[in-house]
Image (cartoon, rainbow, N blue to C red):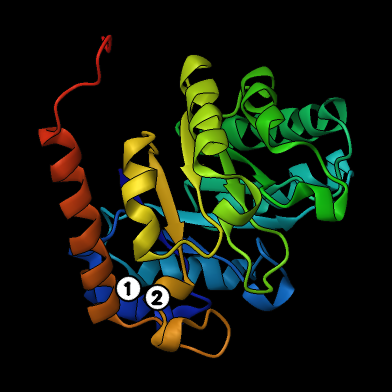
């Protein structure tokens, strides 16, 4: 299970760099522009320069509208700026067909530029609150568009969390569908240390956090701290070890 941390700018990215041994992906976003708010190209470049060369940089393209050409250009801009993971929040797509059209444009634009780039189709656990595509449709959308991963986050940051909208058993189905399609499954949405046991058990590939490694648990007013990253990773690794040591369920395999 990989740990993705989302700093809001270069200063926090430098703090992430101090804890680089405890994380796997540094994710560039702009929280004041939304759940998957896009940051400036020069910020992506600066963060790419700030973190160790071996640490992948992810960039969000935004909580995007149904404007396939616009989104494809934005995704290419993120790749040109140094991101190797490109995340697209399908906020304005109200049907799988719209989401697939957007993601196909992104995949072509990004992979024509850099074939080894990793494209993530991101949806929202609280999709019912904003009218976008159903969370469990994301793995098929990602597969049919040629993306590499399907992700769930929460759109509205009001204290509700991933499991408040998509409970662990439904998240397990999401992970299963992603794996069945040959994709990685990423889960985020105000994830806390207390969620790590369930996230590990269901086979999540990437866990995305921000608030959990910020002072006071506040994704907006708090600041990411290296010691909080280290503590979160230690708890995550503990659950991974316990899961590896657990006996297989009857009939498994």
**Dot 2 lies on which element?**
helix
Count the marks.
2
Residue at the front extreme of this rendering: 250
Residue 56 spot, x, y in % from top left: 36, 52
User: Residue 16: which disc?
Assistant: 1
Residue at image point 77% right, 48% down = 127
Q: Residue at x 32, y 42 (%)?
A: 200
* Tag 2–tag 1 contact (CB < 8 Å): yes
Give the image quarter of residue 194.
bottom left
Q: Quadrant of the N terminus?
A: top left
Q: Which of 57 and 246 lies nearest the eye of the viewer?
A: 246
The residue shown at (23%, 76%) is 18
Front in this rendered view, residue 230 or 128: 128
How many C-alpha atoms fall within 10 Å of the one at disc 1: few (<14), some, or many (≥20)? many
Q: Tell me the quarter of the picture where residue 173 sits.
A: top right
Report which quarter residue 38 is drawn in: bottom right
Is 210 displayed left or right of 121 in the figure?
A: left
Q: Which residue is mark 2?
A: 13
Residue 207 can be seen, yes or no = yes
Residue for point 61% across, 56% down:
164
Where in the figure is residue 247, as x and y percent of width and height?
A: 14, 26
User: Is the residue 87 above or below the residue 229 in the image?
Assistant: above
Separation of disc 2 and disc 1 at Cα? Answer: 5 Å
Residue 24 falls left or right of residue 192? left
Classify 219 as above or below 206. Answer: below
């Amino acid at each position: 299970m990989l740990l993705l941390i989302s700093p809001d700018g270069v200063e926090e990215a430098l703090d992430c760099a101090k804890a680089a041994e405890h994380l796997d992906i540094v994710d560039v976003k702009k929280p004041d522009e939304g759940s998957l708010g896009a940051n400036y190209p020069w910020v992506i470049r600066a963060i790419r320069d700030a973190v160790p060369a071996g640490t992948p940089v992810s960039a969000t393209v935004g909580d995007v509208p149904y404007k396939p050409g616009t989104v494809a250009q934005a995704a290419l801009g993120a790749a040109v700026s140094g991101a190797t993971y490109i995340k697209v929040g399908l906020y304005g797509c109200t049907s799988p067909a719209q989401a697939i059209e957007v993601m196909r444009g992104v995949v072509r634009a990004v992979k024509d530029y850099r074939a080894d780039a990793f494209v993530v189709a991101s949806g929202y656990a609280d999709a019912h609150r904003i009218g976008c595509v159903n969370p469990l449709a994301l793995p098929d959308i990602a597969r049919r568009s040629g993306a590499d991963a399907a992700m769930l986050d929460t759109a509205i940051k009001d204290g509700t969390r991933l499991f408040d909208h998509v409970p662990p058993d439904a998240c397990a189905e999401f992970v299963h569908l992603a794996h069945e399609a040959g994709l990685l499954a990423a889960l985020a949405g105000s994830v806390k240390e207390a969620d790590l046991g369930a996230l590990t058990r269901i086979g999540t590939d990437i866990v995305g956090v921000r608030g959990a490694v910020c002072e006071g648990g506040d994704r907006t007013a708090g600041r990411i701290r290296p010691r909080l990253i280290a503590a979160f990773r230690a708890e995550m690794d503990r659950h991974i070890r316990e899961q590896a040591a657990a006996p297989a369920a009857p009939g498994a395999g």
